[in-house]
């Protein structure tokens, strides 16, 4: 059960809740400043969902797991994974940043690097260690060609 609770979407929702509470209860009169923030926030949220959709599609096409705590059946290096080893997590971070802009949650902006740090420590590093053990040289070559983030 713990593995199903400790997944990135739960962390994302927790951060979104914190950002929303800050935007509704603790504004302290701070603001990003209107329409540009709404537009930029919408672009970030939309871009995050597109990245995630591209990654989900590629992983399904390769018939490997989407669940972070499971061993992958295949090393996915095609599609969006040619550009980043973690497009789903980048998508999560873009969605968080976008909602922070849309909700005018200025004080919640530090949640983005905190979220990325949590994701890296709880998911990215353990996932990469599993991939490194299972796919050895293929994973090493992939890491040489493709950056962890962007």
Image: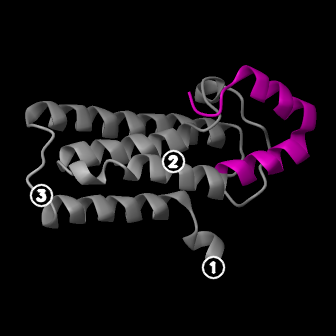
Please identify the residue farthest to the front as the structure is shown. Answer: 28
Q: Secondary structure at mark 2?
A: helix
Dot 2 surroundings within 10 Å: few (below 14), some, or many (20 or more)?
Answer: some
**Bounds of the magenta segment:** 124-150
CA distance for labels 1 and 3? 39 Å
The numbered disc on residue 51 is none
Which numbered disc flags the more N-terminal residue, 3 or 2?
A: 3
Residue 67 quadrant: bottom right
Q: Is residue 76 left or right of residue 73?
A: left
CA distance for labels 1 and 2? 24 Å
Residue 76's spot in the image, x, y percent?
72, 35
Residue annotated with mark 2: 116
Q: Secondary structure at mark 3?
A: loop
Residue 97's spot in the image, x, y percent?
34, 43
Q: Is residue 133 left or right of residue 123?
A: right
Residue annotated with mark 1: 1
Residue annotated with mark 3: 28
Magenta part mainly helix, strand or loop?
Answer: helix
């Amino acid at each position: 059960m713990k593995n199903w609770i400790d997944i990135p979407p739960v962390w994302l929702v927790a951060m979104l809740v914190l950002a929303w509470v800050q935007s509704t209860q603790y504004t302290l009169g701070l603001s990003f400043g209107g329409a540009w923030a709404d537009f930029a926030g919408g672009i970030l949220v939309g871009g995050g969902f597109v990245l995630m959709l591209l990654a989900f599609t590629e992983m399904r096409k390769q018939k490997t797991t989407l669940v972070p705590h499971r061993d992958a059946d295949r090393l996915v290096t095609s599609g969006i994974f040619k550009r980043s080893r973690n497009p789903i997590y980048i998508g999560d971070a873009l969605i968080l940043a976008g909602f922070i802009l849309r909700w005018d949650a200025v004080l919640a902006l530090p949640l983005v690097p905190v979220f990325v740090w949590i994701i890296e420590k709880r998911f990215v590093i353990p996932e990469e260690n599993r991939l490194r053990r299972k796919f050895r040289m293929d994973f090493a070559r992939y890491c040489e060609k493709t950056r962890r983030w962007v």
